[in-house]
Amino acid sequence: MKRFLFIAAAALLLTSCYYKTDSPRGSWAKGCDLSWLSEMEHDSMFRYDCIDSLRSMGMNAVRLRVWVNHSTGWSNKDDMLLLAKRAAKAGQRIMIDIHYSDFFADPHRQDIPMAWREYDYPTMLEAVREHTMDILGTLKEEGIRPEWVQIGNETPNGMLWPLGKVERDKGNWDQYAGLTAMGYDAAKEIFPDIQVIVHVDNAYEQRDWFWQALKEHGGKWDMIGLSHYPMMSAWNGGKSWQEMNQLAEENIRRLIGQWHCPVMIAEVGMFANNEESVQVMTDFIGRIQAIDSCAGIFYWEPEVYGGWRPAEYIPLGWGSYDMGAFTKDGGPSEVLKQLFIDKPE
């Protein structure tokens, strides 16, 4: 009996050490990806606590990417952990976006981390497992319980190329599905109740073939994540933002109906200096808030303003990100305020 009481007390202590969030798990997420925040603060772009400011506006969730070993150190595990601690202390629910790369992973690049370059497939599976458990285990040790984790970032063409590269009717589907399943199982070992997300771009685009193939080859997920950039007409065949928003809504409803799981808008962005941006965001928010199993929305890097560029952009000759949602004076814009409107009951 004494042993039972000791175990029960230890379990209660472990549970109580987790940070408390401002809103219940599973409620509508009004989030921001703030992965550049610590670097921006290093560059003296903020004279106030950005997380606390956004929280006061209604933000209840923070998304953070993590790279394996980027040369600048930003967005690596230690940087992610620093921001995760701050977000948790501010009562924010947390999404961890694991790229399984040393740099951005997206539909056009899914580069194997330098330290993993010589791995064969079985070794790569183990690397995915160890990396996932290391990231989430470190958070657990700090008393941080993420609500969501992405196994890869924008992976309609697979991940960890070439081992996990896929196309519509060909490619390494067994291997890609195996990598996602390994990440899924590893995440559940650390946090059995965490929501595991598989994330693709182009919320407006029907990709029934992708989800069908991934499931048939043993892939696993609890939630579907989508990116939505409705004003990027150069990327979507010249469609208007009105058409983009409508198509995204239809696709979200289709995915929920077909796969019986929630859908999260893991990324959204509007042009910072476009007069239509508020209208675009207002329209999109209204559409997705009306969908019962749409879990919420995260704005991608809204804190960027004033032409700031991250260190990794400079040697690449890339310009500054132009879809931040802060004004030129460094405060939240009207676009961002639309994100925090309460979901109607």
Image (tube, rainbow, N blue to C red):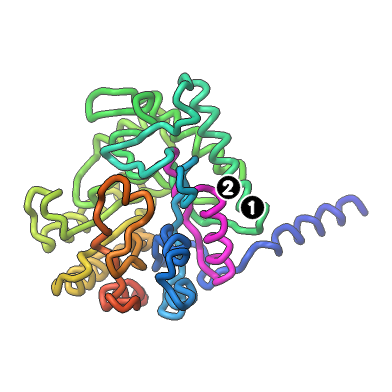
Q: Position of residue 272 (x, y in %)?
A: 22, 68
Q: Which residue is mark 2?
A: 136
Mark 2 neighbour class, 10 Å CA radius: few under 14, some 14 to 19, many 20 or more? many
Q: Position of residue 249 (x, y in %)?
A: 22, 58
Q: Which residue is mark 1?
A: 140
* Res. 263 in view: yes
Which amino acid type corresponds to the residue marked 2 in the rendered image?
Answer: Leu
**Span of residues in magenta:** 76-100
Query: Relative to residue 165, is residue 292 depicted above or below?
Result: below
Looking at the picture, tell me which residue is in the foreground, 13 or 66. 66
Looking at the picture, tell me which residue is in the foreground, 140 or 84. 84
Which amino acid type corresponds to the residue marked 1 in the rendered image?
Answer: Lys
Residue shown at the point (15%, 70%) measured from the top left: 274
Q: Position of residue 13 (x, y in %)?
A: 76, 61
Viewed as shown, does residue 72 lie left or right of 235? right
Query: Relative to residue 262, is residue 270 depicted above or below?
Result: below
Q: Position of residue 97 (x, y in %)?
A: 44, 49
Mark 1, secondary structure of its residue: helix
Viewed as shown, does residue 187 lie left or right of 312? right
